[in-house]
Amino acid sequence: MQSNWWQELERELEQQFDSFLKNHPGQRELLEQEQHRAQQQRRQSRLQEIEAKAQALRSELLVLSEDIRAWRGRVERAQGANATDLASRAEVHLGSLMGQGREKWQSLSVLGEENRQLKEAIAKAEQESPKPPPSPPEAGHADLEEAWKRFEAEQELERLRREQG
């Protein structure tokens, strides 16, 4: 029962909102611009996250490469001293480190691909971005009328939000 009531309320509010947007096409354009801006902002934020993760992975890879280099030297020293048991244990550890390195390289590759795709999406969206509505050529009265319409639209949106709760 509660769910049905809530769904009806959502449907009614959505119908009112759609009706409002039909009666105020400038507001629809503003809403589309805001949605576009928010989506671009989310993309930029994700791009920053990716770049930070990639930088962390690069740092981890540098540390790991030093460990691999050191363990290779240890393997060679153990083999040179005929300490076969120690050399084989060191080789197992070296293999584990190299496996970690491959995983980090793979993760870095995945991040690089996501980075590339996001940059393409950002560039494409910037080209297709909704343009702001043209300003009226005449300031004065026409500008005041437009400002008043925006004010009323914002008031109506605020009322709908309060009703929704």
Image: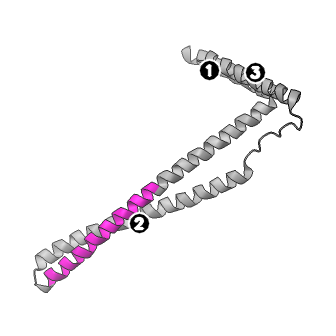
Report the amino acid beneath label 3.
Glu
- Please state which of the two labelled residues, at mark 3 or mark 2, is closer to the viewer: 3
Query: Mark 2 and mark 1: span between their CA atoms?
Result: 48 Å
At which x and y percent is residue 114? 53, 57
Q: Quadrant of the C terminus?
A: top right
- Establish if 131 lies above or below 71: above
- Establish if 40 lies above or below 64: above
- Magenta span includes 119: no
Q: Which mark is residue 7?
A: 1
Query: Mark 3 and mark 1: span between their CA atoms?
Result: 27 Å
Residue at 23% from the left image edge and 74% from the top image edge: 70
Residue indicated by mark 2? 105
**Residue 100, quarter of picture:** bottom left
**Residue 98, quarter of picture:** bottom left
Q: Secondary structure at mark 3?
A: helix
At which x and y percent is residue 31? 71, 34
Span of residues in magenta: 52-79
Residue indicated by mark 3? 152
Residue at 63% from the left image edge and 54% from the top image edge: 121
